[in-house]
Image (spheres, coloured by chain):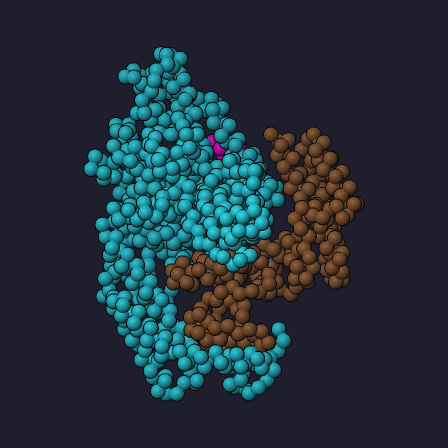
Chain colours: A cyan, B brown
């Protein structure tokens, strides 16, 4: 971006952050099991690795008594030693309420805070503190940011963060909030399969219809994309945000605990023992990807039990989960109106696609061997880094994504009225009119839902709000226009207003399972020691961008219509532009604002003359330039 | 410079007889509907252009899918919010509005039913209400009932597939009929066929649901 080149002159305070004059943005795959950070420069992405050469950072956080967080392999090793202070798989709780977690009870290695007084997002008891999944995810993101800064030797404050395509609005908002807490500006939330396709498509110059089968630790996504000359158009997407390799571990752990109970009788298990069994199950799962069978020692209640598992039994245990992913694949192909043989290639993403049964089932369904020649654990971060570079440095590639789930409102009788259908390209905005059902009704409850089911209570509740001040009218006379807008990050904004009287109501949507603004500000304040300076810097940066845009606009106008000015007027404008440029080179926001205001004042008569001429020309059917150069001449009909 | 002048020429010529608006950035004249200011290149609000105009297509039922895709991709390459990620908040908001309007136009023109609806609306015809006025067309009503019955009685996915195929063939024939009606300027016939297409597409959706039920 030329503006940014201009505003980041050498000698400025952030010099060390942006040596090459371009904002640096990384790509982060914030995974259920592992997270990866990558950076791309000149179209060449690279994964940022630790000293051991490993790009994967376990998404595990250990909390010390003083509240400090330890993320990654070391935290993972503490999982057994200090289970009450270590959290894993927190991504499964992003944007979820206490009730959601109840339905997952027993499958999560967490101690959930029972006090649901706040109603909103679920909280965990960790090391004697109460933490939200957003804060825990922020700790993971902060460690990815640290890794990037260490490796790149400069500050990193912008990122593209990936989310499962099937993540609902609450989970997306939670992810964005977590990044904010970690001091990262999210340039874009990109869907994981789309990021994988980006990495894959650019690498392989793929063209045609591709399916991206992404089975991670906690989420399953299937996306169908059309790739063509740098365009990545998502045709349909589907998945399950609570289905993944963790379920395999769980099935295996239950099998092991069953073997143990058969040998020694049933006993109550501690949190630590459940975690140990899950960890052993994971080891067994990974072994069985290459071996036919194995046995392991399981410790419960101080006694050791030998447990064993062969691949056939393992596959029988996990088959229902794999079958479910294939059923979802079928649904997505149906949505897009294509048959398995129309798909030119199937790309595997996510560590769980290493399981042989998964590969076999995918191959059976699509009738072709899947492609896995890019490391399935790293491909998402690689794609995210490519997109981060595209957003900051410009690019020819274009990602066109869709809404994963339908969005609607609850209507009378608990039914769902869909406003935006799933698989609609984003950004999108749709409006629908509703009416009152009682005479003199002055308020209307609006309940925003996401999902495919017919009944409101079977869909996910995203937000509730009330529209007040509807003027008294007979039932059915009021016209309430509700607008849904989904931005390029897949985030929803809802507005409502009564249209017959023109009375407009401003409504704030409170996310049912998110953090409210107060909570967010408090956390931001607590987590960022330099919050104030950061805020000031952001405001200054925005003022510079805006001022530079102004200068460029005036330069363009001078070039096009300069002859409308006499020498003195032109000199005055040029002087005002120079003053703005000087102010931009400094770091006084008020000085920039004053210089911009002066520039606007000086150029006002110029703008009026340009408008007058443009309108005169249009009325006469003559273009501005031909008026000057050739005199009056009718314009050709388009 | 020359290119910029030509662009300005074209834009101004298009504006002839229509509205000229003021660029929010350089405050000079911009033709209504132009996505960018010809002088300072700032992105403009999407304006009131109809779906055909937005994609630079003549109004008509015949739309070539590949051509539509090309136009849509070319415009999204310029207007998509990804192109404005590091710009000012106002430019980002305008880009989102532009991309939203473009998606709406693309989705409408891509789908024969929505395209037909849009054309009827642009011609001042009353668009058939949701739920269809099947009742006004006894023949269609009878046909609909028979098909639904057959679908409900279908006991296997093979039987459902047969109904799906037959319905798809009807859809294709109906779309062909619409093209003929629109090019002949017979809006009454186009309206009738649009109602029929609405019902046929609903039936295709129902066959999918039935298939899912049968699969369990």
Q: Is residue A600 above or below residue A538?
A: below
What residue sits 30% from the left and 25% below the top?
A: A272
In the displayed structure, does residue A425 sit left or right of residue B179? left
Q: Position of residue A330 (x, y in %)?
A: 57, 37
In the displayed structure, does residue A72 sit left or right of residue A311? left
Q: Is residue B177 above or below residue A379?
A: below
Over which residues does the magenta segment extend?
Answer: A356-361
User: Which quadrant of the view contains residue A551?
Assistant: bottom left
* Foreground of the two, A30 or B201: B201
Q: Position of residue A116 (x, y in %)?
A: 36, 34
Number of numbered discs on residues: 0
Residue extending farthest left: A66
Q: Position of residue B206 (x, y in %)?
A: 66, 39
Q: Is residue A370 above or below residue A484?
A: above
Q: Is residue A303 above or below residue A177?
A: above
In the displayed structure, does residue A352 sit left or right of residue A535? right
What residue sits 44% from the left and 70% below the top?
A: B24
Residue extending farthest right: B139
**Observer able to see residue A285:** no
* Foreground of the two, A11 or A404: A404
């Amino acid at each position: 971006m030329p503006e940014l080149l201009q505003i980041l002159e050498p000698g400025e305070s952030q010099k060390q952050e942006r040596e090459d004059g371009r904002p640096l943005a990384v790509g982060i795959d914030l995974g259920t099991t592992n997270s990866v950070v990558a950076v791309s420069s000149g179209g060449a992405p690279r994964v940022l690795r630790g000293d051991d050469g490993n790009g994967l950072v376990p998404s595990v956080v250990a909390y010390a008594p003083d509240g400090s967080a330890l993320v990654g392999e070391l935290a993972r090793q503490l999982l057994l030693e200090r289970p009450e202070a270590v959290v894993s798989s927190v991504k499964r709780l992003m944007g979820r309420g206490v009730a959601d977690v109840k339905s997952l009870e027993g499958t999560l290695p967490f101690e959930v805070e029972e006090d649901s007084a706040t109603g909103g997002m679920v909280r965990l008891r960790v090391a004697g503190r109460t933490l939200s999944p957003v804060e825990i995810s922020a700790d993971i993101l902060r460690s990815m940011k640290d890794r990037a800064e260490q490796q790149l030797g400069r500050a990193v404050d912008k990122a593209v963060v990936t989310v499962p395509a099937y993540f609902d609005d609450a989970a997306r908002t939670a992810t964005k909030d977590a990044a904010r807490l970690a001091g990262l500006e999210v340039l874009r939330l990109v869907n994981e399969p789309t990021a994988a396709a980006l990495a894959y498509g650019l690498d392989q110059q793929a063209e045609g219809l591709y399916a991206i089968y992404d089975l991670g630790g906690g989420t399953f996504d299937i996306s169908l994309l059309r790739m063509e000359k740098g365009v990545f158009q998502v045709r349909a997407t589907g998945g399950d945000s609570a289905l993944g390799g963790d379920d395999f571990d769980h099935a295996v752990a239950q099998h092991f605990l069953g073997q143990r109970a058969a040998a020694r009788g049933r006993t109550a298990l501690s949190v630590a023992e459940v975690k140990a069994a899950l960890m052993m199950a994971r080891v067994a799962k990974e072994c069985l990807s290459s071996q036919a069978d194995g046995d392991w020692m399981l410790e419960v209640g101080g006694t050791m039990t030998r447990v064993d598992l062969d691949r056939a039994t393992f596959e029988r245990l996990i088959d229902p989960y794999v079958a479910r992913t294939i059923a979802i694949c079928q649904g997505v192909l149906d949505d897009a109106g294509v048959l398995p043989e129309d798909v030119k290639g199937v790309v595997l993403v996510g560590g769980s696609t290493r399981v042989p049964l998964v590969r076999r089932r995918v191959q059976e369904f699509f009738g072709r061997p899947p492609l896995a020649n890019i490391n399935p654990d790293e491909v998402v971060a690689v794609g995210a880094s490519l997109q981060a570079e595209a957003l900051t440095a410009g690019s020819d590639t274009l990602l066109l994504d869709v809404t994963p789930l339908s969005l609607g409102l609850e209507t009378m009788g608990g039914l769902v009225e869909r406003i935006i259908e799933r698989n609609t390209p984003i950004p999108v905005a749709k409006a629908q009119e509703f009416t009152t059902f009682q005479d003199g009704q002055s308020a209307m409850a609006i309940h925003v839902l996401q999902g495919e089911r017919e009944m409101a209570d079977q869909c996910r509740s995203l937000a509730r709000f009330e529209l007040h001040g509807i003027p008294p009218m007979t039932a059915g006379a009021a016209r309430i226009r509700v607008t849904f807008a989904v931005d390029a990050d897949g985030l929803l904004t809802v507005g409502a207003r009564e249209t017959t009287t023109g009375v407009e109501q401003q409504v704030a949507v409170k996310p049912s399972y998110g953090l409210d603004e107060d909570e967010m500000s408090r956390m931001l304040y607590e987590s960022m020691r330099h919050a104030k300076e950061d805020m000031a810097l952001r405001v200054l940066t925005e003022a510079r961008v805006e001022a530079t845009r102004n200068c460029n606009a005036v330069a363009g106008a001078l070039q096009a219509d300069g002859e409308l000015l006499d020498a003195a007027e032109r000199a005055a404008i040029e002087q005002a532009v120079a003053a703005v440029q000087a102010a931009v080179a400094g770091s006084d926001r008020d000085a920039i604002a004053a210089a911009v205001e002066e520039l606007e004042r000086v150029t006002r008569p110029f703008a009026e003359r340009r408008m007058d001429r443009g309108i005169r020309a249009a009325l006469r059917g003559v273009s501005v330039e031909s008026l000057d150069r050739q005199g009056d001449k009718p314009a050709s009909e388009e | 410079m020359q290119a910029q002048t030509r662009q300005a020429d074209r834009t101004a010529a298009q504006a002839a007889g229509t509205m000229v608006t003021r660029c929010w950035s350089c405050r000079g004249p911009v033709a209504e509907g132009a996505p960018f200011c010809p002088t300072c290149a700032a992105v403009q609000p999407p304006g009131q252009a109809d779906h055909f105009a937005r994609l630079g297509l003549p109004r008509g039922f015949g739309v070539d899918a590949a051509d539509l895709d090309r136009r849509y991709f070319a415009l999204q390459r310029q207007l998509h919010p990804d192109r404005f990620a590091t710009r000012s908040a106002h430019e980002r908001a305008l880009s989102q509005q532009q991309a939203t309007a473009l998606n709406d136009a693309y989705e409408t023109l891509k789908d024969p039913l929505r395209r037909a609806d849009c054309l009827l609306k642009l011609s001042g015809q009353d668009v058939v209400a949701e739920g269809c006025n099947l009742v006004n067309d006894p023949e269609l009503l009878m046909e609909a009932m028979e098909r639904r019955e057959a679908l409900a009685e279908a006991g296997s996915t093979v039987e459902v597939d047969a109904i799906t195929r037959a319905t798809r063939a009807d859809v294709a024939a109906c779309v062909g009929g619409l093209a003929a009606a629109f090019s002949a300027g017979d809006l009454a016939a186009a309206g009738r066929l649009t109602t029929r297409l609405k019902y046929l597409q609903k039936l295709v959706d129902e066959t999918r649901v039935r298939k899912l039920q049968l699969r369990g």
